[in-house]
Image (tube, grey):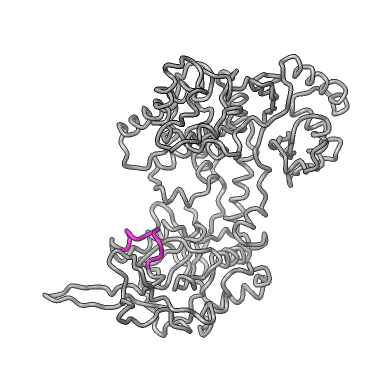
Amino acid sequence: MSDERSPVEQTLGFLLLRDGHAVPLAGISPEEIKAGARHLVPHPDAEPLKHNRTLSAIVDRLGFPGDFGTYKNEGWPSFEAFLVEHGCSRRARLFPSDHGGCIDLALRPVWGPTRRQLADRFFESGAQPPKRVFLGYGVDWATWDSGSGHAPPTAAIPLIGGDPSTALPRAERLWAGRLDLPGQWGFLDDKLVAGPVQHVIDKSYWPPGFSEQERNANLEKVRAAVLAFRAVFDTQPEGWVDVLRYSDRLVVLRAADGSWDVLWRGYRAEEPPKPADVSRSSNLAVEDLPLMLMGESDHQRALHFRQEVWEEHEAHAAEQAFYDRGGSMLERQLAAESDVRLAWLREVGRLPAPDRLFWSGDVPSGFRVVDVGARRLAVSNLIEVGDFRRMLVETGYLDRRARRAEPWERANEGVGAGDPVGATWADAQAFCAWMERQLGVAVRLPSKAELRAMRPFYSERYAQMAGHDFPWENYPPRPLVEKGKGEERRRDLPSAVAWAEPRFLEPGPDLPEFPPPGGRGTSSRKSWIVDFPPAAAWVEELPWVEHGGVRFLDAWDAYEWCLESGWISGCFWEGSIGPTSWGAYKNVKVSFRLVIELGE
């Protein structure tokens, strides 16, 4: 090969083999197949493949008869003859790429159309395979991206085919509706398939509260924008590619200038996820991953290896089902894509529900039974410093702890063994993994919904602040105002943390005591910390409050970690902070408690 980069760097995508192994392919020439085989991504639970067997397995999954030798001598020459017969003269990447392009019209890799979308539509959808599709290759997008942005670029009008007298109004209709197009591309419908645009699906997703009338109105906007787009680009050869079936597992894509590309059945854009991927994303070594996070890796792998599925169709249905169940936009931002899809697949019976590891027998010491909705959970007290120190000694976790994490000791200086521990989200996950080995059952953190069901916000006002920027990073919170018999009584919000260095400057003429009522001010009372992070001991008398038999710290500067990465929950606020922080940079200290699922 003339290109010296590895096939992983120049890959078109991955080909799934029959036994769960995968190979990166930059193309299907014998040399490219051999290069892909050298970079085989093995399935850890399948029989290993030697190089020669890998070569033949690739040939088989591309739909060619015989082994690799047969392919070199017969299959590849036959494929080359097919290219010549159909006027395919030069290899090129025909799908949208980040090379400039027209941002407003949004044919970009992140929006689609993508290789996986077309591969699944052609091979897996069960619909009539498209013979010609629009990928945008060869269109002068730079010209469409020029101009003022308020009207279609003047230079683009002469490029529009068809009746010249209608070119400008067609371009104006497209420009008027262009902002309704991002996120809509793909091959669920006829938007990018040659022929009449009879079927248009709105790929918007609707949280609770939107009426059917509002949804239909948005669909009509999308339909109008798509028809305007097609009225411009149906009249020219640029952007369109022919889809030429070579076999039941392989197609050739041919552009108007003879440029060609290949697409295969079992296409994947990325290599299979590994447990180490979850480990890196959570700042944890594999041995410190609890079953909940290891399960996430298993979920991702299960989705990746499912064959004969139409991914775009499933993802579209799963997204809307998430909101139909009552999910909010904020909750969707916190949910892993694999979890959203798995929930839908189980809901419709395409995947069995997993066997949960339930606790049976007496509830372990330090836990109590709590009913959260229809579920019974064993919920622990806040984990204490002494137990956490025991975990550190037995596991050697401190040696593997992320170096950029805020020092654990600073959160726990001057506290007793029976006090709640201050820890990062990653620390809490490592503790869960250790407890699983002690108890022989899955252990996790409570979800934010579970914590909120057990402990309400102090008031509706504080509930409305949830998810926004942390409100007390630059100023202490305003006092509570309590109205009694004809009088108002003001008291400071309860605090739980005693810092080694003051976190706020004293108020003065140019330094107000609190920010404006809107929360945004031009000044700050945040104190510069000489030795950051300062030690964060607990105050002598902690503000404990009991909710449903479970004790919580109800203070503006004490929080608990949730199952969702980086999400903390408290009486006066909830939101996200860095998962490798125990809260020092936000003027808070975060503890955690554990949850065990109980059987019926």
Along the line of sight, the residue nearer the viewer: 81 or 431: 81
Q: Is residue 388 magenta?
A: no
Along the line of sight, the residue nearer the viewer: 407 or 418: 407
248 on left or right of 413: right
Q: How many marks?
A: 0
Does residue 349 appear in this view?
no
Q: Residue furthest left?
A: 486
Image coordinates for residue 62, horizontal then vertical, percent: 74, 27
224 on left or right of 211: right
**On screen, residue 402 above or below 81:** below
The residue shown at (26%, 73%) is 480
Q: Is residue 467 magenta?
A: yes
Magenta highlight: main SS: loop
User: Considering the image in quadrants, where does the N terminus appear?
Assistant: top right
Q: What is the magenta range?
A: 462-471
Image coordinates for residue 506, horizontal then vertical, percent: 36, 83
**On screen, residue 295 above or below 128:** below
Res 496 → quadrant: bottom left
The residue shown at (40%, 42%) is 323
The residue shown at (52%, 58%) is 565
Does residue 119 appear in this view?
yes
Along the line of sight, the residue nearer the viewer: 56 or 406: 406
The residue shown at (42%, 75%) is 526
Res 100 → quadrant: top right
**On screen, residue 167 above or below 102:** above
**On screen, residue 372 above or below 582:** above
Image coordinates for residue 407, horizontal then vertical, percent: 58, 75
230 on left or right of 4: left
Image coordinates for residue 268, horizontal then vertical, percent: 65, 37
